[in-house]
């Protein structure tokens, strides 16, 4: 799951079916039948289940690293035998239903949406939850809608959904559209079902083809002003950059599912925005903002989510592959799953020249500052393995800063020790070829495999910084690629003030030039519409501030309105030096090893 604050990929994959032949779950839902925001679920259960009937909903799913207890939202649970006679049911709080008797044939129940159902604690992050807006939009995170019989989690699922004609179902899952009102979704197991959310909304999609991969973008916006086509400029460059990085994308189909909500919407229980990633899709719950800000926001979040097709889709431990929904055991390698994804989400943009080195190090600088807030005596592996415990869960967000920095440091250390012949990407690629989507590695053996593929001294780095708590030595690490690190230093930033441009915000959406600035052709009273394509509003003020500072040496485009006419000004702002911590300076060098490592690190060559 990811927000600007948190996120990780939920992935559990199909493995061997139990010895029940072609037995399957047959589920059905009618989206026309919504009462008090609840949907009704009917499941014809597999016939050959032996022993006690225990029907289970997940306590958690690996993408969230929190106690979700989806069973809290299940009501009116009933069970029936092969003669359609009711069977006794008792609930073992909060996620387990015990069914007595013989010949279980069917269960039925109602589901309340997690997005706007009041709870005492542990509100579910919206991209992991459920939402049922009759005739408007339905969000199905399957763990919040469907359960499974204990001992029969790996049997196939067939979900038939009847829906209003104007609603379209989008997912990364296989679907047969029986007619304009009926969809049949198929998954080879419960774990694969939960790995594929579905969104039903009025048809608003865009399709991209990048290499062999088909990319589906599906969008729902509460104000109807944001659409799938407008999101293409955010997503397409990221997908192409990743393809250049990997040479070939490892999936044939991928779905981006977007829900845009008003900033203070009543259907948000957590007050957070972000996304949850899956093997073949990602689901986004984001605020409605001016489209220019939306494009940048989506680029930031989607680049992270999509990159999870590297890890853990094709490289994951047994704890992820055979995830226990009711009593989960967590992997110690969250630092790799989330940290490498976050690191590469910025590095591939540098390699593809979507951002420059200053932009990249601006992100790294922020991560160093954030990582300093993590408890100094807590290693990333210990936090990962114990993340469901409250003490460690509080540090979860640091997988996106310290985790990314550890992966960056490991990448540079591998390059230093192998003189640029190996990188972390190559290590992940080779391990992915060895294991892949359907074969997990053993959690306690991963470090040994990384060392075997690289250099014996890589173990020292792992022991000190990943399984240990020693801070990274950025100065030593970045010597590998000829970059000087300074704990305190100066950076060059563009400045409106130094350029004589003064702005004043009149309200949340109107900003005015408050002083004549003839050098830039601006006059007092001009209304500023956008800066570098970002519309001016209270929501974009911080983004614009960063955009201005980072434009040193580059033209900046200011669009104003004067007497009903649009005027564009495009020229570089004056540059000043500003105090900063964690400064990185690219140095001139003729060292062939350093130049080789720099080339490997900064380009796709």
Image: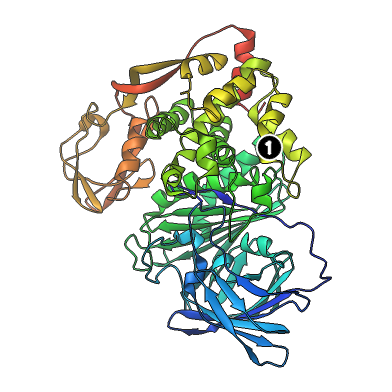
**Which quarter of the picture shows residue 162?**
bottom right
**Residue 117, how many percent across, how many down?**
40, 72
Observer-nearest residue: 226 or 570?
A: 226
Compared with 1, 44 (above or below) is: below
**Which quarter of the picture shows residue 500?**
top left
Observer-nearest residue: 585 or 330?
A: 330
Residue 131 can be seen in this image: no
Instruction: Give the residue drawn at x 60%, y 44%.
Output: 331
Residue 480 can be seen in this image: yes
Query: From the image, which quarter does the C terminus lie in?
Result: top right
**Residue 238, how many percent across, how many down?**
57, 43
**Residue 130, how many percent across, how many down?**
49, 68
Instruction: Give the residue drawn at x 69%, y 35%.
Output: 445
Compared with 383, 469 (above or below) is: above
Compared with 543, 266 (above or below) is: below
**Residue 287, how many percent across, how many down?**
39, 57
**Which quarter of the picture shows residue 516?**
top left
The answer to whether residue 503 is left or right of residue 401 is: left
Q: How is the image coloured?
A: rainbow
Read off the residue under disc 1: 246
The answer to whether residue 152 is left or right of residue 294 is: right
SS class, disc 1: helix
Compared with 458, 71 (above or below) is: below
């Amino acid at each position: 799951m990811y927000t600007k604050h948190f996120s990780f990929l939920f992935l559990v994959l199909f493995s061997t079916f139990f010895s029940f032949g072609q037995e399957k779950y047959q589920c059905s839902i009618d989206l026309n039948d919504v009462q008090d925001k609840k949907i009704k679920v009917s499941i014809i259960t597999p016939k050959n289940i032996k022993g006690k009937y225990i029907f289970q909903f997940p306590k958690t799913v690996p993408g969230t690293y929190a106690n979700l207890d989806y069973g809290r939202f299940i009501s009116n649970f009933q069970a029936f035998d092969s003669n359609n006679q009711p069977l006794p049911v008792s609930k073992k709080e909060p996620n387990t239903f015990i069914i007595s008797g013989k010949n279980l044939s069917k269960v039925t129940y109602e589901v309340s949406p997690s997005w706007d159902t009041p709870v005492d604690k542990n509100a579910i992050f919206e991209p992991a939850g459920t939402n049922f807006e009759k005739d408007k939009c339905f969000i199905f995170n399957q763990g919040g809608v469907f359960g499974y019989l204990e001992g029969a989690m790996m049997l196939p699922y067939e979900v038939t959904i009847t829906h209003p004609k104007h609603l379209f179902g989008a997912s990364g899952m296989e679907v047969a559209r029986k007619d304009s009102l009926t969809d049949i979704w198929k998954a080879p197991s419960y774990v694969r079902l939960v790995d594929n959310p579905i969104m039903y909304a009025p048809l608003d999609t865009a399709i991209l083809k990048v290499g062999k991969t088909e990319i589906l973008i599906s969008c729902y916006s509460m104000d109807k002003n944001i659409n799938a086509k407008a999101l293409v400029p955010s997503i397409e460059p990221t997908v192409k950059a990743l393809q250049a990085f990997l040479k070939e994308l490892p999936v044939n189909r991928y779905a981006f599912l977007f829900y845009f909500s008003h900033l203070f919407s009543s259907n948000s229980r957590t007050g957070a925005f972000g996304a949850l990633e899956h093997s073949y899709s990602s689901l986004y719950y984001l605020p409605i903002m001016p489209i220019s800000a939306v494009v940048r926001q989506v680029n930031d979040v989607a680049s992270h989510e999509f990159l999870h097709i590297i890890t853990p889709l094709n490289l994951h431990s047994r704890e992820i592959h055979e995830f226990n929904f009711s009593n989960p055991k967590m992997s110690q390698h969250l630092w790799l799953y989330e940290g490498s994804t976050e690191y590469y989400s910025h590095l591939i943009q540098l390699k593809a020249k979507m951002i420059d080195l200053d932009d990249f190090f601006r992100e790294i600088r922020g991560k160093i500052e954030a990582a300093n807030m993590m408890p100094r005596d807590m290693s990333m592996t210990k936090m990962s393995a114990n993340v469901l415990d409250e003490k460690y869960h509080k540090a979860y967000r640091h997988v996106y800063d310290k985790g990314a920095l550890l992966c960056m440091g490991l990448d540079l250390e591998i390059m230093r020790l192998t003189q640029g012949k190996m990188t972390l990407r190559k290590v992940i690629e080779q391990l992915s070829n060895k294991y892949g989507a359907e074969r997990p590695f053993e959690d306690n053996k991963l470090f040994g495999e990384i060392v075997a593929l690289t250099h014996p001294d890589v173990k020292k780095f792992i022991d000190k910084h990943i399984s240990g708590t020693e801070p990274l030595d950025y100065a030593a690490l970045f010597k590998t690629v000829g970059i000087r690190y300074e704990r305190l230093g100066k950076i060059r930033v563009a400045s409106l003030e130094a350029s004589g441009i003064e702005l004043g915000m009149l309200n949340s959406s109107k900003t005015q030039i408050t002083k004549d600035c003839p050098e830039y052709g601006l006059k007092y009273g001009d209304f500023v519409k956008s800066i570098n394509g970002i519309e001016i509003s209270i929501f974009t003020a911080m983004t614009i501030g960063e955009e201005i500072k980072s434009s040193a040496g580059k033209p900046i485009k200011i669009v104003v309105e004067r007497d009903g006419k649009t005027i564009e000004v495009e020229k570089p702002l004056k540059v000043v030096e500003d105090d900063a911590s964690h400064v990185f300076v690219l140095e001139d060098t003729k060292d062939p090893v350093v130049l080789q490592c720099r080339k490997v690190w900064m380009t796709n060559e």
